Amino acid sequence: MLQRFFATLRMTENKELEGELLQMEIKVLKDILDANEQIAERNRQLLDSNSVFAVNLMSTPGAGKTSLILQTLKELKGETKIGVIEGDVSSSLDAEVIGKEGVPVIQINTGGECHLDANMLSSALNALPLQDIGLLLIENVGNLVCPAEFALGENKKVLISSIPEGDDKPFKYPLMFHTVDAVLINKIDLLPYLKFDTAVFSQVIKGINEKVEIFQISCATGQGIEQWVSWLQSQMNQRYGG
Ligand code: MG
Ligand code: ZN
């Protein structure tokens, strides 16, 4: 939103003024991200002092964030206490679906903002029974651009990429693919019907981010969910012990 505002301001005939406005824009954006980082650090400490492992789930709209949360809840039921934060531009549809599973869920409506930030997460954390939670799943707003820039204080960032989106996304959103710890290729059951080269896709991602973990999953058939969940458990164990 802010970037659009500055871009409009910069549409001037005066080159010198345009340059000054661009410098100003860069400074404002940097200040916003610095302030966000400070709040994210406080969230990190709060989560840590309650031994909560937090995962920031990001994707385009419709890639399967809510479905993945449901599958993960099913797989870990009785083993790990899970809390969920649902970020949405408006509506509480996803939060209602998750709420039926009997886990604590907090809805964040961003009021038009296209990403969650550390401040929004901080309010949601205050509303959750953190002492009773071992794993916190955070559904970010469906968007591959700014969620990559705003740290929340999470332990891991996870991207869900789905087969219908096509295999060109790492070229279009390199920062997102660079910043995440794992990429889940969802809707793998649709592979026979759509053009998507998983080998090339994985190779390109590894070129951007050599340490990333890649899983092929289907929230519809359950394929690959076990592997995803066991990776998640191993990450939690590394952080807080088994
Ligand atoms: Mg959703
Ligand atoms: Zn945004």
Image: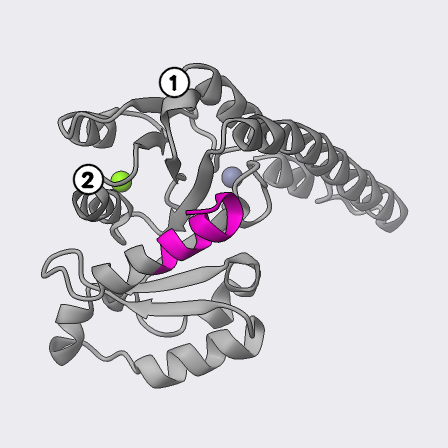
Specify which label sits upstream in the sequence, 2 or 1: 2
**Residue for point 31% across, 80% down:** 198
**Residue for point 49% across, 68% down:** 212
* Label 1 lies in ligand 1 vicinity (Cβ under 8 Å): no
Say which element carries label 1: loop
Classify 10 Å Cα crowding around label 2: few (below 14), some (14-19), many (20 and above): few
Res 128 visible:
yes
Tell me the distance, in whole angstroms, between the alpha carbons under discs 2 and 1: 17 Å
Q: What residue type is labelled 1?
A: Pro
Colour convention of the picture: one colour
Direction from residue 225 to residue 238 in the image, left or right: right
Q: Which amino acid does label 2 sit on?
A: Lys
Res 144 visible:
no
Direction from residue 46 to residue 67 in the image, left or right: left
Residue at the far top: name it: 127
Identify residue for label 1. 129
Q: Position of residue 147 (x, y in %)?
A: 51, 45
Q: Main secondary structure of the magenta part?
A: helix
Direction from residue 230 to residue 220 in the image, left or right: left
Q: Give yes or no for contact between labels 2 and 1 (Cβ–Cβ under 8 Å).
A: no
Q: What stretch is highlighted in magenta?
A: 231-242
Question: Could you say which is closer to the camera, residue 187 or residue 172?
Answer: 187
Residue 168 to residue 134: above or below: below
Identify residue for label 2. 77
> Image quadrant of residue 196?
bottom left
**Residue for point 12% across, 77% down:** 193
**Residue for point 36% across, 52% down:** 233
Q: Where is residue 222 in the image (x, y as percent from the top left)?
A: 13, 60
Residue 231 to residue 83: above or below: below
Q: Position of residue 149 (x, y in %)?
A: 60, 46
Classify 10 Å Cα crowding around label 1: few (below 14), some (14-19), many (20 and above): few
Question: Could you say which is closer to the camera, residue 175 or residue 27?
Answer: 175
